[in-house]
Image: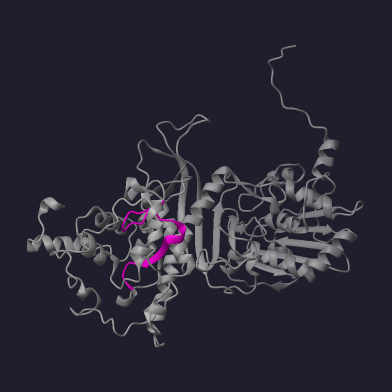
Amino acid sequence: MNSNIIFPMRTDELNRIKADRRIPLTIVDMLFEILGNMSGPIRKWYYDEDEQTLYIYHNDKGFSEKDEKAIQMKNSSGDNSNTVGLNGHGIKLTVDRLLPKDKRCDIVSINTRRTCTIGHFDCTEWTDWGLQNDYDDILQKMEINKNDGGSFIKIPFTNEFHDLYMSERAMLKTKALLMLNIKIAEKTVFFYWNNELQHVDKICPDEGCVTLNVDLGYDSKSESLHENHKKPFLMCINNYDELDDSIKNILPSRYIALGKGTLKPYNMEYKFRSFENLTMRLNSVETQTNTYFDEKDQDGVLVYINEESIVPEPLLRLLGLESGTLTKTYNGKPRFSMHISKDSIIYFIPQDKTNIKLTTKGEHIHRFIHQFGTNYFTQKNNSIETQTDDNNNNETQTDDNNNNETQTDDNSDDENSDITQYTSPRNNSIDTTSSTNIFADICSNNEAPIVNEPKKRGEFSTSTKDQALLEYQNNKESIDNNHNGPDRCLCCDRILKRSQQVGGHIISDNCDGSTGLDNCLIICTRCNNNDIRPIPEKMIEEWGVDHINTQRVEKYLLFVNKQGKNIIPNKRTELLGKGFISQTQN
């Protein structure tokens, strides 16, 4: 006998069935398996309490010959490209659990007038189905016209599952609407629950939504890569040119390298080789905007195939969220949806959908969602809040000196700090580039800021300050090689201890600077010191327009698109034109 001949292993079917019955399935898993095998624009779910039987109808085109064979086989799904069903095995597991031992599931293809039954991993042959039959009463009760065609399924329930269904039917209805929320909202599916047409809004609303159509792949000469290759995992944003500038400020390139903890551009060396396409829809909304669902049913990532969710509750891993906990991470409630294909490799999808897991590549994608979402939505929503505050700013303002964020000089820290450039060369000198009146027109029409009638300083939220720190940590290496180690103050370059970190206003509150992320710069307490000047002005006045500290702040503001980014370069151009500084100083 030739030992080199390879052939498939045989299956011990009895032991295989025992193993299948050990797969954990909740009643929600079974609901998703049944709904996931439906197609067609009209879908009806009808549970008869007296008969303890579930009836399912959808007006698809009936069953093809391939469908008929698939129904009689394990791990075969037939022509299911328009459904959520994956391999055809989940529905067989479900039927086996729900059916009493002496009952069977009836399946009818109304279009082709064919019928068969399946049971506990067994089946009958397909036979002709006459127009006169035992289903007339239930079809009439479900308001189904046989002439409309479609597919019809009858699943009797055990006493145990009947009791469970009756006690959980309100929750099950909610989960069904969660699964179909997009199609119901867009009216591509009309879903009936015991003859009542259901209505629900999208969990991830269109308004304010960021849509990214992306390909995942690698930069490679060859189309095929060795399984142990070290190529960086890349995202290609196919609709990059159509994105708003506020999004491009955070996503600086069509190609983004994933898995490095930063949102940095990637320069292609060879050719992008795609292995998967998907669409992300990312939104952040106010709480209780979709009151039909609990917050825990909406917070996080819902995963969709063919616009139907395959997860009964959102995934939270690596998003900085805790289940059921109100979070300010995204300055609102995160409504994220991932639209994947059935052969996606970013999620591990078992039969029990409650246990869907991220693959390693999926973890990179969720980290990207967290990084982008925390930057974009915090900045966007803070900007909206600032505009609202400006329109309604009639409240009495109090002295800036009463601000809780007042920081005092802490000389004792200097002994333990690595100070490279702290002492300002401009503190005790007068120069044409450091006049205290140079920037008076930033705050008003060529008049110095009024400081004898101070107002209460606008405070950054904790979330905004956290995002500003994360933004600095993600981009510091691109600004200054000296900043690739411990965090340092961008203004003075001293090591930035946690106790010394302050959210400084780039455009000062006295000059109506906002409390959004784009106006927040993490600096040390000494450089902040309740200064009422914009930070770019302060840098030029205290250090000089071409000092390394001023240049570093200038570069950072431009790189991350902060407020006041043009103040330093504009002032340098002005001083060059007036001959106050020479071109060689640049």
Would residue 130 be counted in the magenta stretch?
A: no
Residue in the foreground of this view, choosing between 305 and 237: 237
Identity of the residue drawn at 55% across and 56% down: 319
Identity of the residue drawn at 75% across and 46% down: 71
> Can you say which quadrant of the picture contains the N terminus?
top right
| Quarter of the view holding residue 459 | bottom left
Relative placement, left or right, of 319 versus 79 is left
- Percent from the top left, x then y, of residue 24? 78, 49
- Percent from the top left, x then y, of residue 236? 42, 47
Q: Which residue is outermost to the right?
A: 102
- Percent from the top left, x then y, of residue 442? 23, 73
Identity of the residue drawn at 47% across and 61% down: 466
> Is the magenta region chiefly helix, strand or loop?
loop
Report the number of discs: 0
Magenta residues, as a range?
487-508
| Quarter of the view holding residue 232 | top left
Q: Is residue 65 above or below residue 527?
A: above
